[in-house]
Amino acid sequence: MHVRRRLGPRWGRGVVASAAVLVLTSCSPGTISIDDHDLSDSDRATCEALVDDLPDTIGGELRRSVDADGGPGAAWGDPAYVLTCGVPEPSDYEPTAECSDIKGVGWWVPDDELDDLSEDAHAVALSRTPYVEVLVPSRYRTDGIDRALADLAPAMKEHLADGRPCL
């Protein structure tokens, strides 16, 4: 049985979180730096194919530049939604934890990040592998999060293998 958790308040949309910390810094104005994780050659190739196929907009926000020397990922909007491909499984994830299935992709967030909509959150797609994390700025927590994650689903389902089942 799949349990659907809303990722935000009943009237809006919110997001999920992860213990993996994504450090974002501007390399230069308008460019986002994405952490590079230790990936196998196969996972790196999968992530690069995913990134190449990601949409130009998510949640109504336009794609923006990322540092070419960083890890495989993409960014949209200002402040930016930031997708990082190839993140490790969050250390505080429990196999019995609930996640939200959005268009066939199971997104997990720690409960503490679900509750505080004034903070940035991290959605981790554990139902696909390699794992993908999306940093969601607090600005978007009450407007358009489910839509943004749904915008990512087609490319993720096409390029990523099945991961953990979404409970």
Image (spheres, rainbow, N blue to C red):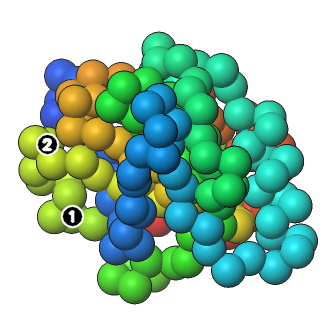
Q: Which mark is residue 111?
A: 1
> Residue 11's x, y, as percent?
18, 22
Kind of residue sitting beneath label 2: Leu
Q: Which mark is residue 117?
A: 2
> Residue 139's x, y, as percent?
22, 30
In the depicted structure, whether residue 22 falls above or below residue 10: below
Q: Secondary structure at mark 2?
A: loop
Circle 1 Cα neighbour tier, 10 Å, few/some/many (<14 / 14–19 / ≥20): few
**Mark 1 or 2, nearer chain start:** 1
Q: Is residue 108 left or right of residue 32?
A: left
Residue at 54 percent across and 64 percent down: it is 35
Q: Secondary structure at mark 1?
A: helix
Kind of residue sitting beneath label 1: Asp
Residue at 56 percent across and 27 percent down: it is 64
Q: Is residue 164 visible?
A: no
In the depicted structure, whether residue 141 falls above or below residue 85: above
Give whichever of 150, 138 is nearer the camera. 138
